[in-house]
Structures are given as C-alpha cells and as structure tokens.
Image (spheres, rainbow, N blue to C red):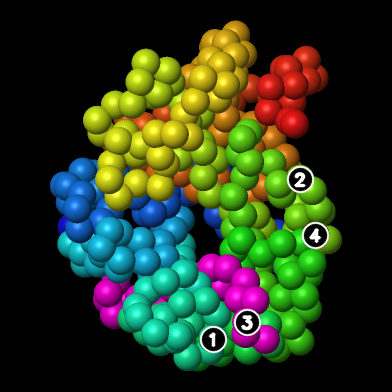
Amino acid sequence: MHTAAPTRYADAAFQARCGRSGLHLPKIALGLWHNFGSVDDPAVARAIALRAFDLGVTHFDLANNYGPVPGSAEETFGRILREDLGAYRDELIISTKAGYTMWPGPHGDFGSRKYLLASLDQSLKRMGIPYVDIFYSHRRDPHTPMEETMGAVATAVKSGKALYAGISNYNPADTARACALLRDLGTPCVVHQPKYSLFERTPEAGLLDVVEKEGLGCAIFSPLAQGLLTDRYLQGIPADARAGKAHGFLRPEQIDAAKLAKIRALGEIARERDQPLAAMALAWTLRDRRVTSAIIGASKVSQLEQCVAAARSAPFTSDELRRIDALTLG
C-alpha cells in the first residue's frame, strides 16, 4: 500500500471549486485515456498515478472505453486502487463516462438509459468500487430524447452509484437544456468536460458563457492537443509518441508543415516566458476563470511533473495573449 506524501495539499490554491458546487478539482487532473490500457506497461501506469496523487492530483478521469482494449484502463486503475490508493479513496475524485462505442448492438453506444446504466455497472465492477464521484454522459445522442439520457444520469446519482452528474462534448444549447433537465430531476449538473486548447478554441464560441451562467465547473480535456503543444514533434515523430502508435488517435498526417510552424512560434513565446511549451499551453487554458481544471495525459512521470508545475505559471501579459491569438485564431 502506497504511503502518500504529506505535502500533497501544501498548495491550497491547486484545488479549485467546481462551479457553484461543493466539489473541488485539482487544477491539473490525470486522464487515463492513454497509457493505462492493457497494451501499456502497468508499472509505468502505477508510477504515474502514485506520483500524481503525491503532487495533489486527486482527480482521475476515466471512461468505459478507455484502453485499449476498451475497459482495460478501468481495470488498471482498479488494481492501483486495491494495491496502493484504497486507503485514500475518500480523498480521490474518480470519474467515468459512457456514450461512445463499448459493445456491439444498439445498446452499446450513445445515450439510451439501458446503455448508460449497464455501462456504469460494468465500470464499477472493473474498478472494484461501489460508486464513482462523477458520472458523465460522454456525448449527446441525437437519436435518444435528452430526457431519457439525463434521466439515466439522474438515476445513477440517486442510486448512490455516482455522487455528481456531468456532461461531456455537449454544445452550448444542449448544455443549457441538459442542465435544466437535471436540475428539475433534483440532480444538478456540476461539470462539463469539453475539448479545449490553443488549437481547439470552439468552447469560446458560447460554451464557456453557458458554463458560467449555469454555475458549472469546466474540466477540459486534450489541453495539449494530444501532445502537439509540446516540443516532441519538432524533429519528427518519436517511436513512443501518440502519433507513432497504431492505436493512437493522433495521426502523422495531422502534423504538417503549417502546424509545425505554429508550434515553433508558440515555443518561442514559451521560451521568452522561461517555460516549456507544454507548460505554457496548460497555463493558457487555466488563465480563463471559467476553466476549473485541465485533464492531462502522461506517458512518463517527468511529463506529469512538468504539467503540474504549469498550474503555478506567471500570468500572461496582454502582448503575449495578442501574439498567441494571432497564431491560433483563424
């Protein structure tokens, strides 16, 4: 059993209130989308998770289909809980989601009541826990009434299998409607999880305003654009990088000359700030008061440590923000 560092809460500012709820999330959270599957080294996954907790990273974000194979990230994290972090369960925020393809047939995908509640039961079994802290509808189902999807999320909370309700990848209008439905059901939505980074600024077109109006927390994912907003790809594609893996979502064709030119220019701004590009990119997402937390992935402990340090970055000057906008907008 792991003995956690006594300094893990030394920086009180690292924990942020999630919207208007009583839930607090660390400014940097650990996502298990990558590097925790059955194809990955379990010793490395364990080292990353334990170091994260020692640094005050209390939120571990999963989904039913994280792997590969789907479900294996939850199994890996379940082992870490049993063998190392079980004594600290009440300090941890464990989240999972359902909404993308998990098993064959019409009830293994999207947002039906049957899929969401069956998936949650499977997730709890894989992790070996009686409840998760946050259960998300992972994406809007255009074919299922939102009343049914939100009703399933509410049931998860009322049954005690989840403590808080969340949504992910919902557009502004659907976010507002989901919040209204969950509020009427007595299980208010507390957090939205959208994709947001220097290269993905869609949430600025209304979503962040809705998040603020509804009193939600905002836990963003892919803040480093799956590693593009680092210096890893400037000299080609490393064999251990996401774009070099057959099961990765980042493909080599996404790293073209124009994108590399932007990354190098952003890297120059980061150097002027005396920090790595990854740290600057994370700090940029956290500069917006509507963003509660940035969920990062890490394949090495050193990457994790660099990301956590980014939460303590110096504020941006108006000139830095102007230069960043010139590179990333349009």
320 inside magenta stretch: no
Which residue bears the numbered disc 1?
A: 112
* Label 4 Cα neighbours within 10 Å, binned few <14 / some 14-19 / many ≥20: some
Which residue bears the numbered disc 2?
A: 204
Q: In this orientation, does residue 197 appear? A: yes
The residue stretch that appears in magenta:
123-145
Which residue bears the numbered disc 3?
A: 143
Describe residue 184's horizontal placement relative to residue 127 as left or right: right
Q: Earlier in the sequence, mark 3 or mark 2?
A: 3
Query: Marks 1 and 4, how far apart in space?
Result: 25 Å
Question: What x and y, as percent, mark residue 173?
Answer: 79, 67
The one of 12 and 239 positioned closer to us in this rendering: 239
Q: In this orientation, does residue 133 appear? A: no
In the depicted structure, whether residue 262 falls above or below residue 74: above
Describe residue 85's horizontal placement relative to residue 295 as left or right: left
Query: Marks 4 and 2, how far apart in space?
Result: 10 Å
Q: Earlier in the sequence, mark 2 or mark 1?
A: 1
Q: Which label is found at residue 210? A: 4
* Label 3 Cα neighbours within 10 Å, binned few <14 / some 14-19 / many ≥20: few
Q: Quadrant of the N terminus?
A: bottom left
The one of 205 and 4 positioned closer to us in this rendering: 205
Amino acid carrying label 4: it is Val
Amino acid carrying label 3: it is His
Secondary structure of residue under mark 3: loop
Question: What x and y, as percent, mark residue 216?
Answer: 71, 62
Judge depth for marks 4 and 2 and give the one in front: 2
Disc 2 and disc 1 in contact, CB within 8 angstroms: no
